[in-house]
Image (cartoon, rainbow, N blue to C red):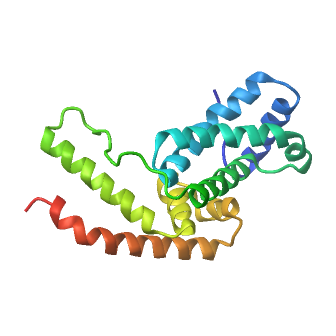
Amino acid sequence: MARLAPNGDDAASDLAVLRAAAAGDRRAAARLYDQYGPMIYRIGLSMLRAPAPAEDLVQDTFVRLWRKIDGLVADQVPVRAWLIRVASNRCVDMLRKHGEVSDDGIAEPADRAAGPHENLAAAQLGHEIDKAMARLTEGQQLAITLTAKLGLSTREAAAAMGMGERAVESLVARAKRALRQTLAAVADDYIER
């Protein structure tokens, strides 16, 4: 399956797939879901810090897409940027409405071959990173998620967030500075001497 791409001529390809989905082509709808569902899930997991709300976010975002698909096609809206913006705004709404959403704070061990001490340290470090991310403003969380975790360019993140590139660069810089300061305090506990 060809990958839907984020910008340039590929945005036209995204629009063609969106048109086909709007016309009732189930394969086109599945293609949109398969391409962008994992990205939306990563946004949700990063911001909401729990799998269940992240899964709900994917469902909710695509329900909104299906409900507005005709208007999006008519307005030739870039699919990827629209999905990121809807998912991001929905995360912020969920966080504001329900407070911080998180799981038990214990991450799954990334490496099953690691020993129990390494697994515990990795889980604790993951928890510290989650706590540090939670201290960021919503804008900083979103900017760092889109650029650092999802690999969007500053231009793409700015389009998705509905702000200028310099504003996104500023949010990312402040987020990195805050994360460095917060995590520096706990780094000695996780660095071998």
Q: Residue at x 47, y 69 (%)?
A: 136
On screen, residue 171 versus residue 104, left or right, reads right
Q: Position of residue 164 (x, y in %)?
A: 68, 73
Apparent side of residue 163 relative to residue 54 in the rendered image (left or right): right
Question: Is residue 182 visible in this depiction of the protein?
Answer: yes
In the image, residue 122 sits, relative to residue 18, either above or below, namely below
- Return the residue nearer the eye: 116 or 193: 116
| Residue 168 screen position, x and y as percent | 59, 71
Residue nearer the viewer, 51 or 8 = 51
- Location of residue 161 in the rendering, given as x and y in whole percent from the top left corner: 67, 63
Q: Is residue 50 left or right of residue 16?
A: left
- Residue 3 appears in the picture as rendered: no
Question: Which residue of the protein is positioned furthest toward the front in this rendering?
Answer: 98
Query: What is the quadrant of residue 170 in the picture?
Result: bottom right
Q: Does residue 181 lie above or below 59 as drawn?
A: below
Relative to 189, 102 lies left or right: right
Q: Residue at x 19, y 32 (%)?
A: 113
Quadrant that contains the N terminus: top right
Please identify the quadrant where the C terminus is shown: bottom left
Residue located at (69% from left, 43% from top): 61
The x, y position of residue 144, in whole percent, is 50, 62
Query: Which of 190 and 59 lies nearest the eye of the viewer?
Result: 59
Residue lying furthest top: 26
- Rendered view: 160 above or below 28: below
**Number of marks:** 0
Q: Which residue appears farthest toward the right when viewing the image?
A: 74
